[in-house]
Image (cartoon, coloured by chain):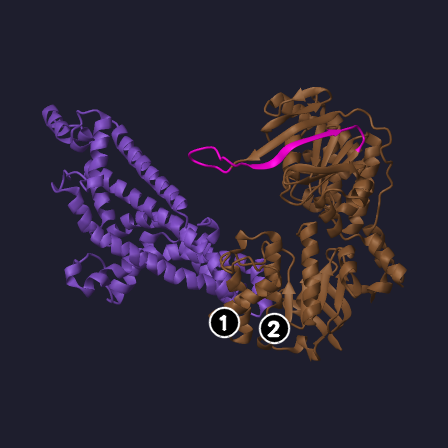
Amino acid sequence: MSPLWLLRRIAGLLFALVAASAIVFVLMDLLPGDPAEIMLGTNARPDTLAALRAEMGLDRPALIRYADWALGLLRGDFGRSLTYSVPVAELVQERLAVTLPLAMMAIALTLFIALPLGAFAASRRKSLTDSTIIAVTQLGVAIPNFWFAMMLVLVFAISWRLLPSGGFPGWSAGPSAILALILPAIALALPQAAILTRVMRSSLLETLGEDYVRTARAKGLTRAEALRRHAFRNALIPVLTILGLQFSFLIAGTVVIENVFSLPGLGRLIFQAINQRDLVVVRSVVMLLIASIIVINFCVDLAYALVDPRLRGRS
Amino acid sequence: MTLLVLDDLVATLDGAALLRGVNLRVAQGEIVGLVGESGSGKSMTALAIMQLLPERTASTGQILFGGRDLTQTAEAAMCAIRGRDIGLIFQEPMTALNPLKTVGDQIAESFMLHEGLAYAEALDKTRAAMDRVGLADIPATRYPHELSGGQRQRIVIAMAIACRPKLIIADEPTSALDVTTQAQILDLLRSITRESGAALLLISHDLAVVASMADRIAVMKDGRIVEEGATRSFFGAMRDPYAHALYEASVHRPARQPMMNKTAPFFVAENCTRLYRKPSLFRADPQPLRAVDHVSLALSPGESVGLVGESGSGKSTLARALLGLDPLDQGTLTLDGVVLDPARKQDRLRLRRKVQLVFQDPYSSFDPRRTIGWSMTEALGHLTEPVSESDKARRVAALLEQVGLAPDFAGRFPHEMSGGQRQRAAIARALMTDPELIVLDEPVSALDVSIRARILDLLADLQAQHSVTYLFITHDLTLLRAVTDRTLVMQKGKIVEEGPTARLLDEPQHPYTQALVAASPDLPAHVAGLQSDV
């Protein structure tokens, strides 16, 4: 990877972060009335409103407020939640301890299901196995994840009593903390896995028709060897693109799933903050989510370059 | 000793016959050329020998390789034969290699697979194999995209010959390459087969290539071999009418009036320069690529001018500049005495009207969602005075007739036509605005020889009728000789030689022109040489 290439990507990353923060800030600022008014509701007394405005620094110019907020984010100072009266950073840290492992489990599960299943379907193209996999993934794409989550609870938690139906005992509780995340991770992962399986299958089928796979066969490789050694990595390139997009769906999905399973995660935090009109929390958490998606997509770009030498440039 | 026998080989896919009874013998160490047009079954024959026919293909007949019937050989045993005893070289070097693996690893795979070598040993042998195909100065750690087309084809050859197979099958190994690269690759194939004692089955659409290489020639049509014989006596003893027709089409020269009294030029390009700069954040590229470098040319009414050069020599860039599709960094274009500036829209439209273009690939040059009639009329009214709908339709019908297509082709879509019909339609489209100059960018190189001969006749007729000027861009010297009055030779963005075509090809002065002429297979001369030997 040439340093110039990397430098350009990093410049792009920084630009995207700055632009995103500006947009988040402006959108919150553009809400009718001002944040203080929204938080206190229409019946607030003028002096309470003025006090809150002063506390939030709303009397200062927008540019200063933006700079304050953005620099604060860089220092890890996310502001102070108005409902919980604690620093937002603390809240986020606590909630991330749930959401981050949940997201990782979901992504791992997605990959673990989609890559082998897609490859399997492609290698048995037009067989009964293939059609069955296609039909099931079609269903998986169509089913809403909250409904699917409730079905999982019905079967595994209520009927069979194998796994907890919701809540989170905290990491100090050991293995039962992991058990509590299993159903939510499955609920998040399966619809994404269904999509990714289909992408993997069609991408691999296309790659199998490429000339270099025929070259590999002419060299004496069996069909399975040609698939494994030559087609698979090439087929991963479109899969990476979709995977990058799926991260954002996954993060949006946590808002719903954490609510269904009453998990004290980031998704639930933002949901509650919106209900309670805690704009300080909303703004910072939204920014955090956007930043994580931008960073993940940056990582996907790097992964492209790792997979595909044509994108690396000559070092 | 006979190495390979195809005995009444028949193959069908979903009811369509691919091969209808192929009989062919290849002796040890022999070079056999298999010639035919697209769809004749040449490539299917190669895939059948490798037992790599498309899935669901049903086949009967025998393929005896060293006495063993490959049609009865189990897949596992076939895998051991492929790459070890039979090496296959494909047409498209650009796509035949895995883009994600180094070329060395791809060659080494053969050694690891068939000779059971460890990676390090396989890499040593890979180095030797790359040296053998003339890539001694290319590191094995290169990726395919870092190599040129010719170098990639050498890699494919190195892969095919790695385990010293008894039979090499080369399916159009040079069709995607430049003339000089083609000559080098053919030389390499010839020397490698001779030196290793392997047999070579050379598949090509180009009779000239096959005649210059093969000991024996077989002509294929509609899934059968219709003519076969030793190269030496082949051309004097052709009995099959199709083989005759194929030969005639290959050496076809359209009847055309050479330009006698040249009038004053109507189109003059002076000192044209086009630079390609690498994009840079900070400063202008200090050493831009001079794609077109101080080129001047003048075209007279009714003449045919050839522009020849290898890929990357700047031919197409020059054509784009002449059409006003790209701006010029330097130089002027003068049309009918008026100096035009392609940066100005008005001048560009004027240029487009008078200068039209016919592309190499007639399929991708038409909008697949529009009828031919729509595509033909599109330029009218933008480039010309407003034209009434009935006049448009009349003009389309008249031009379709002139190019030999029925008027109802106006309502057809590109996919409803054959390659030759599409190229006729492309020529008709170019004539719609009544241009003075038509730039023909490799107009027949994507077509089969028999169709190609007819298109050349058509172009000659139309030139006589419309007294239009042609600028032929091509790398095919036989074509140049047949259809142009004079020729410009382009190398690295510069015109290095120009003159009357016949003289230029007979007595090339510039070393580059000499190399081009030496590299071009010349079928009539070759056949004449063969017959004087007999």
According to the rendering, which colour does chain B have?
brown
Let me know if residue A93 appears in the view: yes
Look at the image and give the residue range highlighted in magenta.
B278-303
Q: Nearer the viewer, mark 1 or mark 2?
A: 1
Q: Residue at x 53, y 67 (%)?
A: B108
Res A188 → quadrant: bottom left
Foreground residue, B514 or B431? B514
User: Callout 1: 10 Å neighbours few (<14), some, many (20+)?
Assistant: few
The single residue placed furthest to the top in the displayed view is B338
- Residue B84 is tagged as 2
State the SS at label 1: helix
According to the rendering, which colour does chain A have?
purple
Res B159 → quadrant: bottom right
User: Callout 2: 10 Å neighbours few (<14), some, many (20+)?
Assistant: many
Q: Is residue A203 placed above or below B72 in the rendered structure?
A: above
- Residue A74 is tagged as none
Let me know if residue A277 appears in the view: no
